[in-house]
Image (cartoon, grey):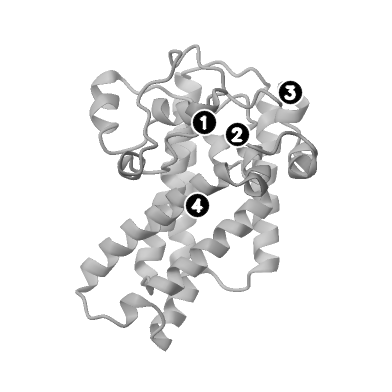
Amino acid sequence: MTNELWWRLGCFFSVLALMMLFEWYKPARKSVIGLRQRWSANFGLVLASSVLTRLSIPIGLTALALYNAQQGIGLFNIINLPNWLIIVLSLLLLDIVIYWQHRLFHQIPFLWRFHRVHHADAHVDTSTGLRFHPLEILLSIGVKMIAVSALGVPAMAVLIFEISLNALALFNHANIRLPNVIEKPLRLILMTQILHRIHHSQVVTETNSNYGFSVIWWDKLFGSYKDKAIKSDNELALGLIEYPEAKQNASFIALLLMPFKNKSFKNK
């Protein structure tokens, strides 16, 4: 745990650099907006979220997990199970929590106000995996803090989950197309780029599918899995119909203000 920051930053920047390199070498789709404009907005949101989180939440998830363990707070700090089993169960349960958090952000109009900042991107690449409104990030951290405390998730499981979640979000948003010989078997387990681009489709029934950031199991279990869009991956229109202009899709200030503008708040 003493090297948590270096583990997280090392994995994050390694995956980010690798995905961006693949995107540069062989992009799946051509961006309809200039990369400089999009990246300044998307990475600007990351910085804003980091500052807001640091100022608003004084304790990290791993520190919270350590405190819970010391105080005997949460299910896994009460029941007697092997450590390896607790870690496995913790990872699975946290992933289900994130699946339902994501799904509810689509279904509840107030939450959709914030999550639509992510979906308004008219092009999907690795930076889109970081494009979330700072207030959505705060809400998400709050959900994870409740889950970690209620379940008594150990600090090691928190660290593994956070690293995996960030890495897989960068992976499945990447503007790449894996060869069929890799993509087809991989999509039996993981949310691949093609599957996740369906989630970013302008067709509402497609947007409201494939909520998982990592595995596809929860989408299949809860009936939200879609393995094929109406259009091919090359022709799929991405983003939100109500935000067609570049300045609305890729302006840092516009993205910060987007949840408070009187656009359609229902994603149905």
Q: Residues within 10 Å of mark 2 (few under 14, many from 20)?
A: many
Amino acid type at circle 2 is His
Q: Separation of disc 3 and disc 1 at Cα? A: 20 Å
Secondary structure under the numbered disc 1 in the rendered image: helix
Nearest-to-viewer mark from 3 and 1: 1
Amino acid type at circle 3 is Ala
Q: Separation of disc 4 and disc 1 at Cα? A: 15 Å
Decide: marks 2, 1 in contact (CB < 8 A)? yes
**Which residue occupies 49% across, 63% down?**
144
Q: Residues within 10 Å of mark 4 (few under 14, many from 20)?
A: some
**Which residue occupies 61% across, 41% down?**
131
Residue indicated by mark 4: 101
Q: Separation of disc 2 and disc 4 at Cα? A: 15 Å
Ranked by sequence position, the earlier of labels 2 and 4 is: 4
Position of 237 relative to 221 (above/below):
above
Q: Separation of disc 2 and disc 3 at Cα? A: 13 Å
Ranked by sequence position, the earlier of labels 3 and 4 is: 4
Quarter of the picture holding the C terminus: top right
On the image, the x and y values in percent for residue 20 come to 50, 31
- Position of 254 with respect to 77 (left or right) is right
Residue indicated by mark 3: 246
Residue indicated by mark 1: 207
